[in-house]
Amino acid sequence: MKKFFAVMMFVLLFACSTSCGTQSLSTIETQTLSIDGSKGKLSAVIQRPELNPGEKCRMVMILHGLTGNKNETHITAIAEALEARGAASIRFDFNGHGESEGDFVNMTIPNEIEDAKKVYDYVKGLDYVDSVSVVGHSQGGVVTGLLAGELGADKIHSIALLAPAAVIKDDCIRGIFIGSRFDAENPPESLKLNDSLSLGREYLLAGQTLPIYQTSKNFTGPVCLIHGTADRMVPYTYSETYNMLYSNSELHLMPGADHQFTGFVDEMAEKAADFLVK
């Protein structure tokens, strides 16, 4: 009998220590929320490490690209890489994308910048945030550059641009966008991208006059550029141009990586997260 109780006690202690150990590893808090944007509510997810009372951490805004969303593999991979480094992140759907309100046809880069400003205002007011960095992919990279150029290094700590699609301005001027041709001098009311999405006239007109490089270069904080050499949507030469404009930047070209960093997502996320938390 004594032997039986001794064995049972061992099993109970082992189970307790195992469950307690699992509990202690659960240090990440996830919050789903909505934030007022330029065209309605923006659907967002915050991931942050468990912090001690009064402790603060870096918050990183993650901006997806055109037709993308906050739950794409390369977006969530960045959030997870930031988690592992003790940083918080917020990823959200721009207006007309994913689970956010607004119609895609009414989306423009200027109103995406307004979306990003509202998200910045929200996270900057959180009591556990000590500074804010931003990372953006493709069109989100363009928005990131423009946002940082407008707000300045006193508000944005650092930025990472992933395959930033500055080609958008050239395409809007040339009258061809992702294979769809249009009259650049008199853009149509809508330009079909696929069976379900169309760009609006205001997007095309605004795209022709975007001060992409002029505004982006005003940011004097640290900048990281990551671009695949096999990117056929946005040639890596656009990142090279950004790199020449910035006073405090580094460029990482990834041989063989395409626009979505297929097969290189983890490597890209690690590079971006390492930069943004250092």
Image (cartoon, helix red, strand yellow):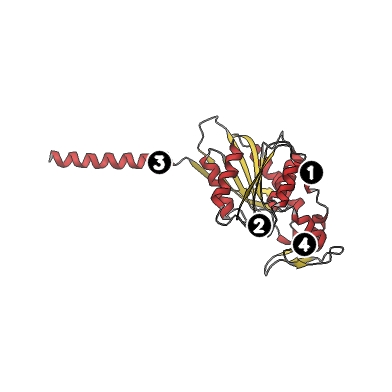
Identify the residue position indicated by label 4 in the image: 200
In space, the residues marked 4 and 3 are separated at their CA atoms by: 50 Å
Q: Residue at x 78, y 59 (%)?
A: 171
In space, the residues marked 4 and 1 are separated at their CA atoms by: 24 Å
Give the crowd class for mark 1: few <14, some 14-19, many >=20 residues within 10 Å: some
Q: Secondary structure at mark 1?
A: helix
Q: Secondary structure at mark 3?
A: helix
| Earlier sequence position, callout 4 versus callout 3 | 3
The answer to whether the residue labelled 2 contacts the one labelled 3, judged by CB atoms less than 8 Å apart, is: no
Question: Nearer the observer, disc 4 or disc 1?
Answer: 1
Give the crowd class for mark 4: few <14, some 14-19, many >=20 residues within 10 Å: many
Question: Is the residue 117 above or below the residue 263 in the image?
Answer: above
Identify the residue position indicated by label 1 in the image: 215
Q: Amino acid at mark 1?
A: Thr
Identify the residue position indicated by label 2 in the image: 231
Give the crowd class for mark 3: few <14, some 14-19, many >=20 residues within 10 Å: few
Q: Residue at x 70, y 46 (%)?
A: 144
Residue furthest to the right in view is: 185
Q: How many marks?
A: 4
Q: Amino acid at mark 2?
A: Asp
**Residue 2, visible in the rendered structure:** yes
In space, the residues marked 2 and 3 are separated at their CA atoms by: 42 Å
| Earlier sequence position, callout 2 versus callout 3 | 3
Q: Residue at x 70, y 53 (%)?
A: 139
Identify the residue position indicated by label 3 in the image: 23
Question: Is the residue 123 above or below the residue 105 in the image?
Answer: above
| Earlier sequence position, callout 1 versus callout 2 | 1
Q: Position of residue 118 (x, y in %)?
A: 70, 44
The answer to whether the residue labelled 1 contacts the one labelled 2, judged by CB atoms less than 8 Å apart, is: no
